[in-house]
C-alpha cells in the first residue's frame, strides 16, 4: 500500500510517499481502509521531533515509527481477535498511528461509528481538533449556557470547532482572528469578533467566564486580567520553541497564580475516546456543528499540506484524500 513515511526528523522534505506492507491489527485494533485523514499541528511535531522532549516517546536519534498522521475516517477492513464492537464494513472515524496512508490500524477505544449523513471528510476533521475544543470547554472550563467565552485562534482547526461547540452549549462567544477571517468566524456563530491586527483584546472592558487560548501569544497575567471572577483560562496552544522553555515556565506558573484569587489558569492535553467522538459527531449529524474544511490534498501531497498548516494560517481543517 502507499503511505507517507519519514525516517529522519526534519522539515516536510523528509517525507516520502512509499509502497510499504499493509499493517496487521493487534488484538484490540481494527484495520481501516482510509477514505480521508486530517492534518494537525501534532503531525508536524512528530515529523520534526519537536519539542525535543517528544523524542523520549518517538525515538531519540530517529523516529521509531516511520508512519505519520493520526486523524482518520474510513471503512473497517479487518478486526483484531478481541474486537467485538466493530466488524468489517463498518464506517468509522477516530485516531490511529499512520493515517497518511491507504490503510491504518487503530485501537477500538479511539474510534466511533460514522453516521451515514456525515461525510468521510467531515468525520476525518473531527478527532483531535474537535475533542480538544470539547474537552477544553466542557472539562476544564465547565462551560454553561450564558457563559461568555473567548476563543483566541478562532479561525483554525480547533478554533472553528470551539466557536460552534461553545454555541451548542449556549455560551456567548467572542472569536479572535485576523481581518480576512472575521466573516468566517461570524459565519460559524460567533456573537462578536476581534481582529487581532487592529485591536488589543486585553484593553477591552469586556470580561469572560472562559478563555480558550489556542495561540499562546500573551502572558498568563494578561489573560488573568480579561477573566471574570471565578473565570477559567484554558491554555491549549502548542509551541514552536523546540526547548519548550516558555510553555514549561507557564505550566509551572499557572497553578501558582491560580492560588491567588478566584480566577483559574489551567492547561489541556486532549485525549481521543469513543464517547467524545460520538458526542461531537452527533452534533455534526444534527447540524449544530459543521466542520470547516479549508483545503484538500491527495495523499502524495501530504508534504504540501503540512507546509501549509505549519505556516499557521489555515482556515479550519486541512484534509487528506485518497489518490
Ligand atoms: N493541547 C492539546 O491537546 C492540543 C490539541 C490540538 C491542538 N493543540 C494546539 O492548539 C493550537 C491550535 O491548533 P489548530 O489545529 O487549530 O491549529 P491551526 O489550524 O494551524 O490554527 C491556525 C489558526 O491560528 C490563527 N492565528 C495565528 N496567529 C494568531 C493570533 N495572533 N491571534 C489569533 N489567531 C491566530 C490563524 O488565524 P489567522 O489566519 O486569522 O491569523 C489560524 O486560523 C496549536 O498550537 C496546536 O498545537 C493542542
Image (spheres, rainbow, N blue to C red):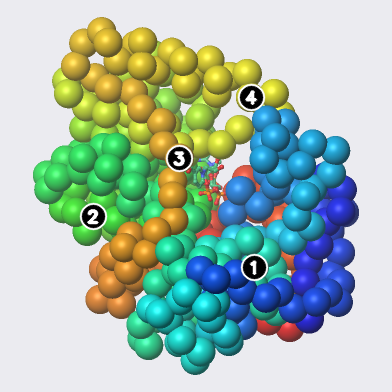
Badge number at residue 99 = 1
Give SS at disc 1: loop
Disc on the earlier residue, 3 or 4: 4
Apparent side of residue 115 relative to residue 149 in the rendered image (left or right) = right
In this rendered view, identify the residue nearer to me: 307 or 200. 307
Which residue was labeled with disc 2? 167
Rendered position, 130 above or below 287: above
Disc on the earlier residue, 1 or 2: 1
Disc on the earlier residue, 1 or 3: 1
Crowding around mark 3 (Cα neighbors within 10 Å: few <14, some 14 to 19, many 20+) is: few
Q: Quadrant of residue 287?
A: bottom left
Crowding around mark 1 (Cα neighbors within 10 Å: few <14, some 14 to 19, many 20+) is: many
User: x and y percent of residue 9 in the render?
Assistant: 83, 45
Q: Nearer the viewer, mark 2 or mark 4?
A: 4
User: x and y percent of residue 162 in the render?
Assistant: 36, 51
Q: CA distance from mark 4 to mark 1?
A: 27 Å
Ligand 1 lies under 8 Å from the Cβ of mark 3: yes
Amino acid at each position: 500500500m502507499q503511505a507517507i513515511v519519514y525516517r529522519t526528523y526534519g522539515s516536510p522534505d523528509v517525507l516520502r510517499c512509499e509502497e510499504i506492507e499493509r499493517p496487521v491489527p493487534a488484538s484490540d485494533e481494527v484495520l481501516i481502509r482510509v477514505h480521508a485523514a486530517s492534518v494537525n499541528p501534532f503531525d508536524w511535531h512528530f515529523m520534526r521531533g519537536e519539542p525535543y522532549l517528544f523524542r523520549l516517546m518517538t525515538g531519540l536519534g530517529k523516529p521509531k515509527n516511520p508512519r505519520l498522521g493520526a486523524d482518520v475516517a474510513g471503512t473497517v477492513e479487518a478486526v483484531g481477535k478481541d474486537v467485538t464492537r466493530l466488524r468489517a464494513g463498518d464506517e468509522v472515524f477516530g485516531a490511529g498511528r499512520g493515517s497518511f496512508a491507504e490503510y491504518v490500524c487503530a485501537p477500538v477505544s479511539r474510534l466511533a461509528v460514522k453516521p451515514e449523513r456525515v461525510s468521510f471528510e467531515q468525520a476525518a476533521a473531527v478527532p483531535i481538533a474537535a475533542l480538544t475544543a470539547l474537552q477544553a470547554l466542557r472539562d476544564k472550563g465547565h462551560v454553561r449556557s450564558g457563559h461568555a467565552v473567548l476563543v483566541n485562534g478562532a479561525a483554525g482547526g480547533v478554533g472553528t470547532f470551539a466557536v460552534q461547540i461553545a454555541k451548542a452549549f449556549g455560551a456567548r462567544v467572542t472569536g479572535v482572528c485576523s481581518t480576512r477571517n472575521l466573516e468566517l468566524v461570524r459565519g460559524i456563530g460567533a456573537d462578536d469578533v476581534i481582529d487581532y491586527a487592529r485591536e488589543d483584546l486585553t484593553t477591552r472592558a469586556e470580561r469572560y467566564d472562559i478563555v480558550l487560548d489556542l495561540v499562546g501569544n500573551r502572558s498568563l497575567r494578561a489573560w488573568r486580567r480579561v477573566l471574570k471572577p471565578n473565570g477559567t483560562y484554558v491554555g491549549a496552544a502548542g509551541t514552536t520553541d523546540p526547548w519548550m522553555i516558555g510553555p514549561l515556565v507557564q505550566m509551572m506558573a499557572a497553578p501558582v497564580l491560580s492560588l491567588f484569587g478566584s480566577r483559574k489558569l489551567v492547561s489541556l492535553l486532549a485525549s481521543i475516546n469513543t464517547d467524545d467522538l460520538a458526542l461531537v459527531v452527533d452534533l455534526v449529524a444534527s447540524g449544530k456543528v459543521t466542520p470547516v474544511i479549508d483545503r484538500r490534498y491527495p495523499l502524495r501531497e501530504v508534504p504540501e499540506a503540512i507546509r501549509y498548516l505549519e505556516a499557521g494560517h489555515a482556515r479550519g481543517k486541512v484534509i487528506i484524500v485518497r489518490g
